[in-house]
Image (spheres, rainbow, N blue to C red):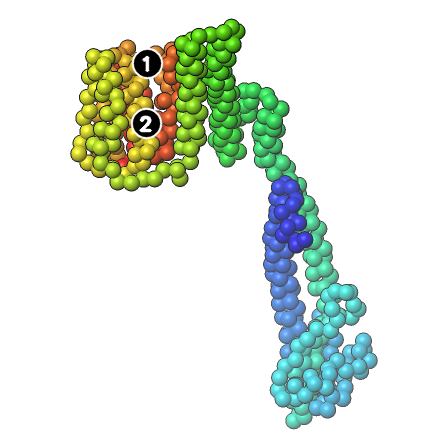
């Protein structure tokens, strides 16, 4: 398993703390490095200035053949001839040469050599910084070596390193702790929301997350979004329960009637006419079951828009085909069915639009009164189909659920129809990317389809 995969498996809080720790480590390392470099540069500059001053005084003494002057505390000196033999040396050196043959050769060609003896870490004794160059005394070349001890400078740098390491460690611990507490505090509402949402698995109803009303941060917006989702889930579950109850009732009624008809027919011998009436009644209920099943299958098929086959169709032909079967029904009832559509073409699926309009006309003729009008307008790429009547309109309490499955304006379920007509109309509108709307007007009821065309 790769490191990335292992990190992904860690809890969010742990990953956040690791991110804070790594980031702070880089920042502290950079800051400590900058501080160390600045202090080291300042100390080195002071040491180099002392060494250069001491070197000049030694050079002047060698040229003048005067006694060599003492330097800063703990300083050392050495004078060599051109072949590297020690002519004069500090007592602490005991005529031990400080320069290598390569350095002697470099100085012989006129260069100045400066280097450190000993290291900062690990701690070593007699750490020096030396500088050597060639001078001429009475016509003879001499190599003058000046050295100063670095003990105070190295001790200051080691103390600085220890203090920087301690301060960085304490800062890193404090930052990690603050990051941990901050991450826990930030994610605590998320965990509370998760626990609240998990209660849905226990079948609890009316579950809502406790979201503060006086905040508007990202976590609070997440809580509001989850509450909206829970509302939709609860509404969907309620619709499902109502659908199952309604479907069970709708299926039970024709089955019960058929069973009663058959029981009566089998209870005693019947004449041919009575048996024919019984079979016709059973046939009516069977047809009702078939219509109900077909309606449910159509609704399920319309749930996926890929079942639509859009094509260019004349709006007048579509409306005429939908209205023609209902003209005779309207005439027999002494009512008028008027159609007002423009002579234009639209893009849609006539296989679904035609029965949807038929359902609207059938409802208007069955439950409405007076003239039924089917009007269509096309404007800016939108088709608006409206079916109105002059009846009493919808009950106000029915309008919010007019397009629900098995919804009926009548209190009784024994009336003709399954309550799926308007649900089918809305499914057709939704599948076409449009909407369906029902309302009461000053003259009756109106149902409108708004579709892209």
Of badges 1 and 2, nearer the viewer stands: 2
Residues at circles 1 and 2 in contact by the CB criterion of under 8 Å: no
Question: Is 352 drawn above or below residue 263 in the view shown?
Answer: below
Query: At 40% across and 23% down in the image, what residue appears?
Result: 291
* Residue carrying label 2: 356
- Say whether residue 298 is visible: yes
Instruction: Work out whether mark 1 precedes mark 2 in sequence or the reverse, and give the earlier one.
Output: 2
Position of residue 85 measured from the top left corner of the image (x, y, whole percent)? 76, 88
> What is the number of the mark on residue 394?
1
- Looking at this view, name the residue that lies furthest to the top: 268
Question: Is 55 drawn above or below residue 298 in the view shown?
Answer: below
- Looking at this view, name the residue that lies furthest to the bottom: 139
> What is the number of the mark on residue 402?
none
Query: At 73% across and 73% down in the image, what residue appears?
Result: 117
Q: Tag count in the figure?
A: 2
Would residue 49 be found to the left or right of residue 90 on screen?
left
Query: At 37% across and 14% down in the image, what residue appears?
Result: 416
């Amino acid at each position: 398993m790769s490191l990335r995969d292992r990190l992904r498996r860690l809890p969010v809080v742990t990953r956040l703390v690791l991110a804070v720790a790594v980031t702070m480590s880089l920042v502290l390392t950079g800051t400590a490095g900058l501080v160390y470099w600045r202090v080291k540069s300042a100390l080195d500059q002071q040491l180099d200035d002392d060494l250069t001053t001491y070197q000049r005084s030694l050079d002047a003494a060698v040229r003048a053949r005067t006694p060599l002057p003492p330097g800063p505390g703990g300083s050392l000196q050495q004078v060599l001839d051109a072949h590297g033999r020690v002519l004069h040396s500090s007592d602490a050196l005991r005529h031990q040469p400080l320069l290598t043959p390569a350095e002697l050769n470099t100085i012989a060609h006129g260069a100045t050599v400066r280097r450190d003896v000993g290291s900062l870490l690990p701690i070593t004794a007699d750490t020096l910084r030396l500088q050597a160059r060639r001078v001429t005394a009475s016509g003879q070349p001499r190599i003058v070596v000046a050295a100063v001890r670095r003990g105070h400078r190295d001790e200051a740098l080691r103390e600085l390193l220890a203090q920087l390491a301690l301060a960085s460690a304490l800062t890193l611990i404090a930052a990690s702790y603050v990051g941990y507490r901050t991450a826990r505090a930030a994610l605590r509402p998320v965990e509370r929301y998760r626990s609240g949402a998990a209660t849905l698995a226990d079948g609890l109803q009316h579950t809502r997350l406790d979201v503060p009303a006086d905040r508007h941060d990202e976590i609070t917006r997440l809580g509001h979004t989850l509450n909206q989702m829970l509302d939709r889930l609860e509404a969907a579950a309620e619709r499902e329960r109502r659908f199952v109850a309604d479907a069970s009732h709708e299926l039970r009624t024709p089955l019960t009637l058929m069973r009663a008809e058959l029981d009566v027919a089998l209870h005693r011998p019947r004449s041919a006419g009575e048996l024919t009436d019984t079979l016709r009644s059973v046939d009516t209920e069977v047809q009702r079951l078939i219509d109900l099943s077909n309606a449910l299958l159509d609704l399920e098929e319309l749930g996926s828009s890929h079942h639509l086959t859009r094509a260019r169709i004349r709006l007048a032909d579509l409306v005429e085909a939908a209205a023609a079967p209902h003209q005779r029904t309207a005439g027999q009832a002494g009512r008028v069915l008027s159609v007002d559509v423009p002579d234009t073409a639209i893009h849609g699926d006539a296989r679904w639009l035609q029965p949807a309009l038929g359902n609207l006309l059938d409802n208007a003729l069955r439950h409405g009164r007076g003239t039924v009008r089917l009007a269509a307008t096309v404007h800016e790429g939108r088709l608006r189909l409206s079916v109105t009547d002059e009846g009493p309109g919808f009950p106000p309490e029915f309008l919010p659920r007019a397009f629900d499955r098995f919804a009926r304006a009548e209190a009784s379920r024994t009336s003709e129809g399954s309550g799926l007509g308007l649900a089918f109309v809305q499914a057709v509108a939704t599948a076409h990317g449009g909407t369906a709307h029902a309302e009461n007007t000053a003259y009756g009821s109106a149902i409108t389809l708004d579709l892209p065309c």
